[in-house]
Amino acid sequence: MSESEYQKLVERVLENTSVPMISSDTGLEAAQKIGQLAAQEEVEWAVAGGLAMYFYGSPRLTKDVDIIASKNLSLTPQHKLGFGGSSYTLQVGKYEVQIDWIVRNDGYQKYYRAALKEAVNIPNGLRTITPEWLVILKINAGRQKDLDDVVFLLRQSNLVDRSTVKQKLIEVGGEDAWLIMMPNFRRLCDLADGNTKEPSKYYDQD
């Protein structure tokens, strides 16, 4: 998918008011606001997590804004993130929005750096990671809600290029990383394609 195709996809989602948005639509404004500060401080950043899921059409609500970045900002953090980065609170109108500013310093750092490097520009001055990298990061996270998010992404027509998921994982982590992820990825593909009776908590089709 080209960058212009990503932009058109996100524009369609943003125009669809039937899709719920986090924190009464303050998530977008919070991301824009902190993105402007990041630009001033020459920090690379891209939206990930629940807000990225929203850009790709997900109906699941999220309570905060997750952003991956090349380094921390000059803001005073509420607390440090255990895996690297900081949690900031940003005032947007009358709302306080929690922003997890993720700068991984653990074994998954190389995946986040690659996802950040390949992030795409979308409307409203924002950047977001691609669906393929969102799949990889969420499988690595391994929580049930992340795996159900992966199933949702895989079910969307022409959104996730599954061969690119494999390609990117091997490029960054090597063949062993793919062999470790492959059984779970195939299981999630089966769930998305309806080739198993195993339930998917959030995105079961009626």
Image: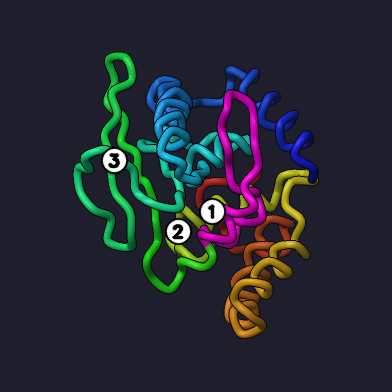
Q: Is residue 19 above or below residue 71?
A: above
Image coordinates of residue 154 in percent, x first then y, are: 68, 53
Q: Which mark is residue 74?
A: 3
Residue 96 location, quadrant: top left
Q: Are marks 2 and 3 in contact (CB under 8 Å)?
A: no
- Element assignment for label 2: helix
Look at the image and name its color scheme.
Answer: rainbow
Image coordinates of residue 131 in percent, x first then y, are: 65, 49
The residues bearing labels 2 and 3 have C-alpha atoms spaced at a distance of 33 Å
Residue count near mark 2 (Cα–Cα under 10 Å), binned few <14, some 14–19, many ≥20: some
- Residue type at numbered disc 1: Asp
Q: Which mark is residue 144?
A: 2
- Element assignment for label 3: loop
Q: Which stretch is magenta?
A: 112-138
Residue count near mark 3 (Cα–Cα under 10 Å), binned few <14, some 14–19, many ≥20: few
- Element assignment for label 1: helix
Q: Can residue 22 be seen at all in this image of the molecule?
A: no
Tell me, yes or no, whether the highlighted magenta stretch contains residue 45. Answer: no
Q: Which mark is residue 148?
A: 1
Q: Can residue 149 be seen at all in this image of the molecule?
A: yes
- Residue type at numbered disc 3: Ser
